[in-house]
Image (tube, rainbow, N blue to C red):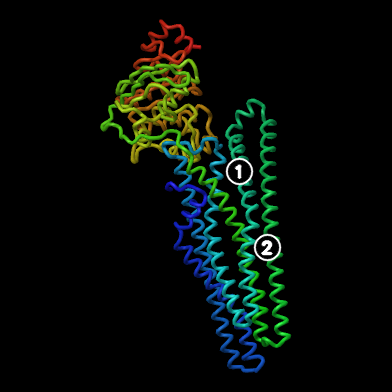
Amino acid sequence: MGADTAGRGVIRRAVAGQRRDVVVGSILGACHQIGEALVPVLIGLIVDRAVVRPDGGALAVWLVVLAVVYTLLSFGFRFGARAGERAAEQAAHHLRLDVVRRVLAPHGGAEAGRPPGAVVNVATEDARRVGAVNMALTLGIAAVVGVVAGAVLLLRASLPLGLLVLIGAPVLMALGHFLARPLEHRSEAEQEQAAHASGVAADLVAGVRVLKGLRAERAAVDRYRATSQASRAANVRAARAAALQTGLMLTLTGSFIALVALVGGRLVLSDSIGLGALVSAVGLALFLPGPISVLAWVGAELAKGRASAARIADVLAAPGETTGGTAEPAAPAPGELRLNGLGHAGLDALDLTVRPGEHLGVVVTDPADAATLLHCLARRCDPERGSVELDGVPLTELAPAALRSALLVAEHDAQLFDGTLLENVTAAAPAGADPGPAMDAAAVAEVASALAGGTGGRIGERGSSLSGGQRQRVALARALAADRGVLVVHDPTTAVDAATEARIAAGIRRARTGRTTVLVTSSPALLAATDRVVLVDGGTITAEAPHEDLVHDHPVYRTAVLT
């Protein structure tokens, strides 16, 4: 998106990216407006040349001319509106891609401080409003041409009427822009509240099972009711501002047209203009409210677009969780992972080398320390002290995308997506790779057999149609199918029965033969299948040995994995 991520910059890029359709739509729309302005003039000419002095031949000719003008203006509107809508939809689509691309960027940070629903609202409703600026510009330019054309034609009919329109129309446009400012602020507040309400709703839906288990439905309903009422109040305030702005503009426009009609009537009474000119003047006076009201609508749309553009700019300009790093991993990558005096939060001076191809178990007695370790390995944060190296290169020096392609940290709360079971398993798999071994290792066949359609069966948003153990198996299969050189997995079988867990432990070992694997877990079945186990207690490494030896010799380890 570039360095300029201010709200105005977002709008400029949205318009510049669709400039062809905007220009085409504006030209065709202008042709439509000119045609509309010519209609009353042509009717006035017909009155003067074929009605006041009856002439059947002239009447037929002018009616044909009128029909041609109507045909051209109708096609101008049709294809001009199509170009404007296409520009609006394309711009909104590109903005959605930009927002999603920023959210999924390897350096992260876009979602910080924003619930998922708020980010979704930015990528949908805000992107739509900014895209709609293209349609507003298309219609606005055409409306300006319409006002100018009407004024020019009025000048030809009557100099005073033409001057009146030329002076009055810019004043009305300036008033419309001034009146739209309160709407812009209230529209921004409305979008903030709507995004917050969407975020709360998404969180409550995602945690509905937990809420039912805690019998906290009433508290959840009360929370959402308060949030929804705040969103409704903001929406009402924005609607009132829009109604006030529209009402005031219609009042001013009506007053202006009444003034034009009054001046035109006095000119007719003084014989300054004829009957045909009077008809043209009245027709143009009735035509002018159309483009002027469009200009008022354009002002409101631009106000909403600016508010939404500012929100999109905030997401696009959000600082990353990690910065720097341009190096690429070694090729071919041995897969050695090394912690050198790692210190962060509760962790202190961790020294550990995971040899290439090793199957290592890590038991962390404090869940907070386990989360910190995983964040450092995934480079969701950089350690305060020491370093983490992959094949001798510090993670801070590796490009984020390159790091993700070499090292995968599959956290315990991994999310599944709405789609088929197979689509979820192969979401991060290399193109053309066979997901069968990964699915066998994670015992996913049993999950598939319970779905209508097998591996082609849909599992719902966040795997809502699956049990907790089934979701864990699908998430583990996805991590194995990704086929990274180094895989770190956190508690992948906490909701799986003991027999299935033992099969999964052997399956992980089989699927990851020759590649580095780190299991951060307290599961005896998984730890028994590792080459060695490291115990982290009190933020430091206190023991290191095979699982059986630690169970026999180390009371803290025995308590951590067997109770």
The picture quadrant where one finds residue 102 is: top left
Location of mark 1 (residue):
192
Q: Which mark is residue 8?
A: none
Judging by the rendered image, the residue that carries numbered circle 2 is 249
Position of residue 366 relative to residue 266, above or below, is: above
- Where residue 484 appears, as percent x and y from the top left, is 35, 31
Relative horizontal placement of residue 182, taking residue 467 as reference (left or right):
right
Q: Amino acid at mark 2?
A: Met
Residue 86 is situated, as x and y percent measured from the top left of the image, at 49, 60
Residue at 65%, 78% (x, y): give it.
161
Residue contact at pointers 2 and 1, CB within 8 angstroms = no
Residue 435 in sight in this render: no
> With respect to residue 255, does 446 lie above or below?
above
Q: Earlier in the sequence, mark 2 or mark 1?
A: 1
Say which of 553 and 303 sits in front.
Answer: 303
Query: Would you place residue 39 above or below residue 230 in this image?
Result: below
